[in-house]
């Protein structure tokens, strides 16, 4: 199923604001499920330096992502399809040592 990011830029957002918004989107998607919509809210990513917020969805359509935002009374600047890149789990991941993290 397709994945989408709903992108928005807004100054003055804090972590508590974003937690509240994520809860509103979660509730909106749950209500949409009651009506048979095929959509999942995967979470949000915040770019504080850019004041950007990206809400990640798996959805049958871009229109459903827009509807979730409407129900949650949240605006978005645009909705774009995304292509996840799968990690080859057969290749061992490099783990940072304590020394590297300092």
Image (cartoon, rainbow, N blue to C red):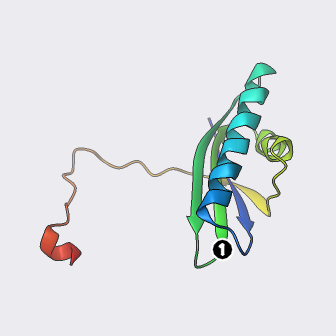
Q: At 84% from the left edge and 41% from the top edge, which residue is drawn?
A: 71
Q: Nearer the viewer, residue 13 or 56?
A: 13
Q: Is residue 60 visible?
A: no
Q: At 18% from the left edge and 75% from the top edge, which residue is drawn?
A: 100
Count of numbered circles in the view: 1
- Residue extending furthest front? 16
Q: Secondary structure at mark 1?
A: loop
* Left or right, 31 with reference to 56: right
Find residue 85 and report its horizontal and vertical position in percent.
45, 52
Q: Nearer the viewer, residue 19 or 74?
A: 19
Find residue 22 and report its horizontal and vertical position in percent.
66, 48
Vertical position of residue 65 compared to residue 47: above or below: above
Find residue 2 and report its horizontal and vertical position in percent.
64, 41
Find residue 37 and report its horizontal and vertical position in percent.
76, 26
Q: Quadrant of the C terminus?
A: bottom left
Q: At 70% from the left edge and 51% from the top edge, which residue is drawn?
A: 21
Q: Is residue 25 visible?
A: yes
Q: Nearer the viewer, residue 30 or 3?
A: 30
Provide the residue designation for mark 1.
Answer: 51
Q: At 14% from the left edge and 67% from the top edge, which residue is drawn?
A: 97
* Left or right, 17 with reference to 64: left
Query: What is the crowding at mark 1: few (fewer than 14 residues within 10 Å), some, or many (at least 20)?
Result: some
* Left or right, 55 with reference to 75: left
Q: Quadrant of the N terminus?
A: top right
Picture quadrant of residue 61: top right
């Amino acid at each position: 199923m397709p994945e989408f990011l709903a992108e928005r830029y807004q100054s003055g957002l804090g972590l508590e604001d974003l937690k509240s918004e994520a809860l509103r989107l979660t509730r909106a998607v749950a209500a949409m499920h009651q009506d048979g919509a095929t959509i999942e809210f995967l979470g949000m990513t915040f770019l504080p330096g850019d004041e950007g917020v990206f809400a990640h969805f798996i959805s049958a359509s871009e229109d459903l992502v827009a509807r979730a935002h409407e129900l949650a009374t949240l605006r978005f600047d645009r909705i774009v399809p995304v292509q996840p890149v799968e990690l080859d789990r057969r290749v061992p991941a490099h783990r940072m040592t304590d020394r590297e993290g300092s």
